[in-house]
Amino acid sequence: MAKVLIIGIDVSNHQGKAKLDLDKILTKHPEIRVVIIKSSEGTDFDDAYDEEFIRIALAHGCIVGVYHYAHPERDGWLAEAKFFMSLTKRYKGKVFYVLDWEVRSAAKKVEWAESWLAYVAKETGSTPIFYSYESLINSANYSRISKYPLWVAKYRDYTPDKNFDMSSAGKAPVVKWWSNYIGWQWTSVGRLDGYNGNLDCTAFYVDEAALKKCVGGTAQPAAEFKYSRSAIVSEAISHIGVKEGTTLHHKIIDRYNSRTPLPRGYKVKYTDAWCATFVSYLAIVMGYTDIIPVECGCPQMITLAKQMGIWVEDDSYVPKPGDITLYDWQDSGKGDNAGTPDHIGIVEKLSGNTITVIEGNYKDAVGRREIAVNGRYIRGYIVPRYDDEDTAESRQRDESTKEKSTVDYAHTIDYYAKVSTKTDPLNVRIGPGAKYKQCSFSPVPKGAKVAVCKYKAGAWYLIKYKGKYGFAHSAYLKKT
């Protein structure tokens, strides 16, 4: 066993409610050099005792850490990271930050943990620490986060240990993925003179100087993590296989119903169709409700998307991962599909001309559907304004199609014009030039009124006609 260099404890509302006098304990036990304090859990639990504990521990000259108890089975990493930062970022440069990873049902959601740790590192300029149990760490591949220091828990039993006596601690943890760990939490029933309750106690195998390096303090911008296509797709993938009527299905419904105010005041039942509820749930747990509509009905999703300026029903549009597909199962396959939508899902990937969509309420579960680009039944797309546009998928799409969808251009209306061709109707194309193919609504009749948008590429102007967009030559547009 490695040499123990410093000793620490971690405390939370459990000790606060048990009337722990931290000042008294630290005065009586100067051997305690590290105090790690719970600050938050999920997206709504703010530990009521953390401010007092942090103040006291810092006053005693201790190295102080603050931790967040994760719920990856319930919430998105961004929503939880933002909540944690809202409570603790003010301490940057004074504390180190810890992700408490204990939920066994989410053992394999490593990308969630990786994103959370990266976000906190950027926001605080520190090196966050990953905490978990020996058995949980060894149950999945955590190699992608092994660059972060590991604090591991392993208890021999629940027999109280007095005053940091480790003689009955048992064998030290053995973990995969990390060559070593900075600390071993060997008991949750530590006892100290002056306090009758239980304490989690940790033996650290690094010295104070090494642990203080985790504190950091030079914050870097983390805007690139704000709204991520890959993150929400990963969240959707993690729910594949959730079946209607199960506890996990009920959690999706319950989380949607917890939204305040509840859209249209309607509380979704466990027996209701839940495809739109699932997409809305993803937006809620990821903290993406500023860019994705929240509703339990498909028609209302389109209405909200139009209000947000993110609705596209251009036949030429090639979706990206994270876009949201609406379907109309009554579509005849002839002409434009303008019917009432019946179903909805989130695009996972694009391969050639095939879209893979993840859907709630797909055969009474969360599942995948494959459908052709611009295939029959597609009513249109909600295209949220994500921040990570330069993804591998989007680059692959651009290279394979060699065409840009009109959704990529500025749609703000500049002025209105009348089609002023001599005899023939006006051809409208999906890109700015005659080399591009015509839009599904092309041609536009002579004399028709169109909206001219602010985006202009030389002589080619982006126009809007009957709710759809395309490019037309400016020589045939007479401003009205």
Image (tube, rainbow, N blue to C red):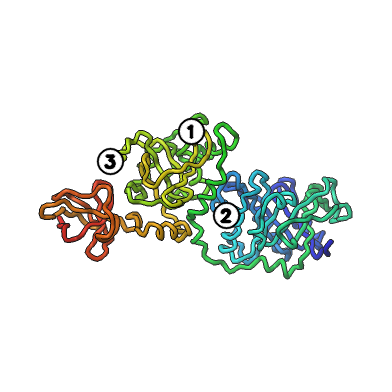
Determine which quarter of the picture holds residue 477.
Answer: bottom left
**Residue 66 in view here:** no
Q: Residue at x 45, y 40 (%)?
A: 261
Counting residues from the start of the chain, the first of labels 2 and 1 encountered is 2
In terms of secondary structure, where does tag 1 sit?
A: loop
Circles 2 and 1: CB atoms closer than 8 Å? no
Instruction: Pick the residue in front: 145 or 371.
Output: 371
User: Distance of mark 2 from mark 1, alpha carbons?
Assistant: 28 Å
User: Distance of mark 2 from mark 3, alpha carbons?
Assistant: 46 Å
Circles 3 and 1: CB atoms closer than 8 Å? no
Farthest left residue in view: 422
Where's residue 199, x and y in %?
A: 78, 51
Residue type at numbered disc 2 = Ala
Q: Is residue 236 above or below residue 274?
A: below
**Residue 415 in view here:** yes
Counting residues from the start of the chain, the first of labels 3 and 1 encountered is 1
User: Distance of mark 3 from mark 1, alpha carbons?
Assistant: 34 Å
Q: Which residue is mark 1?
A: 268
Determine which quarter of the picture holds residue 141.
Answer: bottom right
Where's residue 443, x and y in %?
A: 21, 50
In terms of secondary structure, where does tag 3 sit?
A: loop
Counting residues from the start of the chain, the first of labels 2 and 3 encountered is 2
Tell me, for residue 85, which label it has, or none.
none
Residue type at numbered disc 1 = Val
